[in-house]
Every structure is written in C-alpha cells, then in structure tokens.
Image (tube, grey):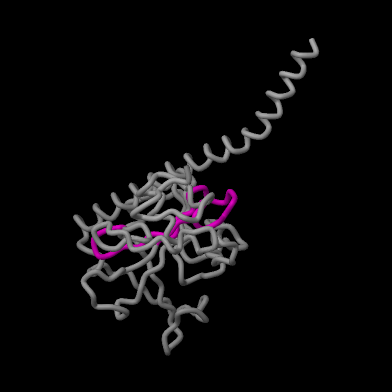
Amino acid sequence: MAEVLITLGIIGTVAAMTLPSIIQKQHEKVAVTQLKKAYSELSQAMSFAVNEDGTADTWNVYQYDSSGEDSSIGGDSEGAVQRYEPHNLIKRLKVVKNCQFKSQGCFIDGGYKMLGGGRERNFETLNNQYYKIILSDGTAMAFEGYEPRLSSSEDRAYGEIWVDINGSKKPNVAGKDLFLFIYTKDRIYPYGYQKNNVPLSNTNCKLNSSGYDCTSWVLAHGNMDYLYCDDLSWKGKSKCK
C-alpha cells in the first residue's frame, strides 16, 4: 500500500510540473490556428475587393467630417476630421459589431503590451486613427490607412491592420494574441515580410522586442517558440527543441 501511495505521489508531482506546459502549448496551437484563419479571411476580402472594386490605390477610403466631433485629431486647417474608412475590405468580412471610430468596446480599454513588456497603443482612445470591428468568431480588427502622399513606390503599403485573435481575453500582448498586417494595393502581408513573401527580418520577434514581426514568423513556421528561446532565425533554427 505504501509503495502504491509513493507511486501515486510521484505521478502527481510529475503531472503538476508538466500540465502547465502542456496547457500553454495547447493555447499556442489555438493561437496559431486563429491567426491563420484571420489571415485567410483578410486575404480573401482583399482578393474580392481587388477583383470587384479595383486595387487599393483606387479606393476612396478617406472621408472628411466637419461636424466638429473629435476634431482635435487628424483635422485639416478648417477643422474637418480626415477619417480612413476601409469599407472595401470590411464589407467582405463577417462583422458582428462595427465600432467605427468610437470607443464602444471593440478593443480592450487600457491598451496592450509589447512582447518585451513595453506599453503598446490603446485602440479605444485613438479615435479617428483606427476603424474598429469585431468578427463573428470574436476576432477584433483595427484598420489604419496611410496617407497617399507618403510614398509613390509601386510596392508601398496603403494601410495596416491590427488583429486581436481572441478579442478582450488576455494576455493582450503583441506577438501573443495581437498581430500586425499591412496591405499593398493588391495583397495582405503579415508584418515582417517584403513583397513576394521574402522575409524582411525577425529582429522585432524576440523576447525583448515589440513583437511586430511575430506575425510573419507564426504564419511561416506554425509555432510561437520565440517565447522560449531567443536564437531563432529565418535561415537557421526555427524551433527551440
């Protein structure tokens, strides 16, 4: 009987030590799946938009509001507020809540953190800058357009899309559940890639970094091992073990 109890005690101790790791790995697998789904939905939306509306350089995405509401941000010399309205993409997504530019709970109020622990932006307070929605699966998205005058390059980005794959649930950290995409005139790119999916870098996907480049890492390698080791590279080690 004593031997049985000792054996059960050992098994319990081992289980207590390994169970948190198993649960964490399962959470990461879910996060990878959710990010892939979000990327697929955005890519499909872009494809339909380009086929039906033309490329992003022809979209009429900037609107001006002279009502005076929130005119302290993004206004022109006459006080009108310039707002980016990515209706070409949004109308092709399964939106259940459209917060537009208002603080209506599409994103957590309090802001996010960078992977390295630094403070990240609070989308709820950056009205006029981000157009915010929630999809049917709970994914939150915030869209920001780039001024057309910023670049005339053929490969220029026309905007960025922040994706919180689990909405208001924790941890609310870039590289864990918050991921960044950009789009050119005809395609969505995970942040960290150049045109034609050529890796740009992974310097922003390390334990002490912003976590921005982790979007491209997760989609390319299907893991979040950058959370455990800091010597991964695009041309070399892609897993911690």
Q: Quick check: can you spot residue 100? A: yes
Taking depth in this image into account, of 236 and 125 the one nearest to the observer is: 236
Q: Residue drawn at (71%, 24%), measured in percent from left and top? A: 10
Q: Residue drawn at (44%, 56%), measured in percent from left and top? A: 214
Image coordinates for residue 79, horizontal then vertical, percent: 46, 85
Q: Quadrant where the N terminus lies?
A: top right
SS assignment for the magenta stretch, majority:
loop
Position above or below: 193 against 94: below
Taking depth in this image into account, of 220 and 236 the one nearest to the observer is: 236
Image coordinates for residue 46, horizontal then vertical, percent: 28, 55
Image coordinates for residue 236, horizontal then vertical, percent: 36, 52
Q: Is residue 169 left or right of residue 35?
A: right
Q: Is residue 207 left or right of residue 110?
A: left
Taking depth in this image into account, of 114 and 109 the one nearest to the observer is: 114
Taking depth in this image into account, of 27 and 38 the one nearest to the observer is: 27
Q: Quick check: can you spot residue 97? A: no
On whether residue 164 falls in the magenta region, the answer is yes
Q: Residue furthest top?
A: 1
Q: Report the span colored magenta.
A: 161-188
Position above or below: 29 against 230: above
Q: Is residue 23 left or right of residue 221?
A: right
Image coordinates for residue 171, horizontal then vertical, percent: 59, 51
On whether residue 69 falls in the magenta region, the answer is no
Q: What is the total number of numbered labels drawn onto the structure image?
A: 0
Position above or below: 218 against 50: above
Q: Residue furthest bottom?
A: 77
Q: Residue drawn at (38%, 70%), measured in percent from left and top? A: 84
